[in-house]
Amino acid sequence: MRLSRSFLPILRETPKEAEIVSHRLMLRAGLIRQQSAGIYSWLPLGKRVLANIERIVREEQDRAGAIEVLMPTLQSADLWKESGRYDDYGKEMLRIEDRHERAMLYGPTNEEMITDIFRSYVRSYKELPLNLYHIQWKFRDEVRPRFGVMRGREFLMKDAYSFDIDEAAARRAYNRMFVAYLRTFDRLGVKAIPMRADSGPIGGDATHEFIVLAATGESAVFLDKAALDTPIPPADVDFDGDLTPIVAAWTEKYAATEEMHDKAVFEALPEDQRIEARGIEVGQVFYFGTKYSEPMGAKVTGPDGVEHAVHMGSYGIGVSRLVAAIIEASHDEAGIIWPESIAPYRVGLINMKAGDDATDTVCNAIYERLTNAGIEVLYDDLDQRAGAKFATMDLIGLPWQLIVGPRGLANGEVELKRRATGERETLTIDAAVNRLI
Ligand code: ATP
Ligand code: MG
Ligand code: MG
Ligand code: MG
């Protein structure tokens, strides 16, 4: 993409309304624009990051055996009356009436709807296990939307729902999502620690929140330092095999949110091993048994020929919140530092003297070679002073900057800068291109 043909509304001023660094940087780098409290438009660069996160989330859900569907944002209130949550959910639910005066709502989550889908088609234990997920916008009328997309009202969530014949099978489903989450967050370039957590209004008796440590996080957390070094399962982990040792390696180490904190157990750890910190909840996994299947009649015939209410779990990832959480974990004074896996472009190609025949020709050739090799390049072909170009590239945080100026070109050389470390290297054009391919 040529900068001259793109839409990248950079703000030079620091927006006053933004209280935390990720929100400031998302506004300044032109990733998002607020449309109303807690409701955002995603501008081109932000949209690309969001899509990259979605892709990784989807790949890891698929790998773990979950199957993608897409449910609507608007739901009928009737389903929520069946589960009993229509009255319980309170003011966080946005209630809407259609022209026929039917009670509708903008879904804050989808347990009821997925249970309805399940009960409409599945009759036998032979069709289990089943895990269906979607990546869809949710609406929660948060009392205090703040920190940009970190706590929005409209936000993008991946939510998966598992169905099993009994508790033992449901716990295996839980473990599959647990392992998928470890891999997902690792690929997104963040350290998310699973912690014992409160189950809240979704209900249930087994749940972990996946939390990224960050000073600006809204949750107080307590953990054993050893949790930080627990290994991430590899890509070829056998999801059909026994995952309990992997899960146990994490759950055996102390890690809990404030609600579940057990001071006595925590303080039994050696002092230099205790971490008291703040964190951002980027995902949560729940096992809640028959909480929805029982009242909503989601039953299958078991091997014993008798009908059983299915055991369910639900598994959320805050896709849009992750954009902010990743920035909180990865930035410096100059701007964002995207992990390679989700960067909106991998390379920023900077033409230091746009309009000059020599630099234009070389930049065009490099742009074409990289693009043909499948590398995403943002080509700064604007006629601007060097300082502004560097500031923009640092702000938007692409992993690599390839700088082409007349002085270097006189010797056939360009400069390659790694955003994360600031390291610069002078290389021949070929060497620089080969480094990136
Ligand atoms: P929180 O404790 O932050 O209010 P939650 O526990 O209510 O989140 P869940 O029901 O567990 O949220 O939803 C799954 C995921 O969706 C969360 O782990 C979080 O990453 C994301 N999420 C929840 N609420 C919001 C929001 N208002 N804005 C952005 N992401 C959100
Ligand atoms: Mg909430
Ligand atoms: Mg929570
Ligand atoms: Mg939660």
Image: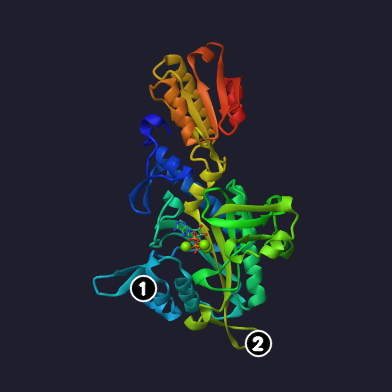
| Residue identified by numbered label 1 | 76
Mark 1 vs 2: CB contact within 8 A = no
Label 1 Cα crowd, 10 Å radius (few <14 / some 14-19 / many 20+): some
Q: Report the quarter where the C terminus lies.
A: top right
Amino acid type of the residue tagged 2 in the rendering: Asp
Q: Which residue is at the far left?
A: 99
Q: At 49% from the left edge and 17% from the top edge, which residue is drawn?
A: 405
- Asked whether 227 or 159 is in front, the reply is 227
| x 45%, y 56%: residue | 156
Secondary structure of the residue carrying numbered label 2:
loop
Image x and y of residue 134, in percent: 48, 62
Dot 1 lies on which element?
strand
Percent from the top left, x then y, of residue 52?
51, 47
Q: Residues within 10 Å of mark 2 (few under 14, many from 20)?
A: few
Q: Does residue 68 show up?
A: no
* Lateral position of residue 332 relative to residue 98, left or right: right
Q: Of the residues shown, which amino acid type is indicated by label 1? A: Ser
Q: Which mark is residue 304?
A: 2
The color scheme shown is rainbow
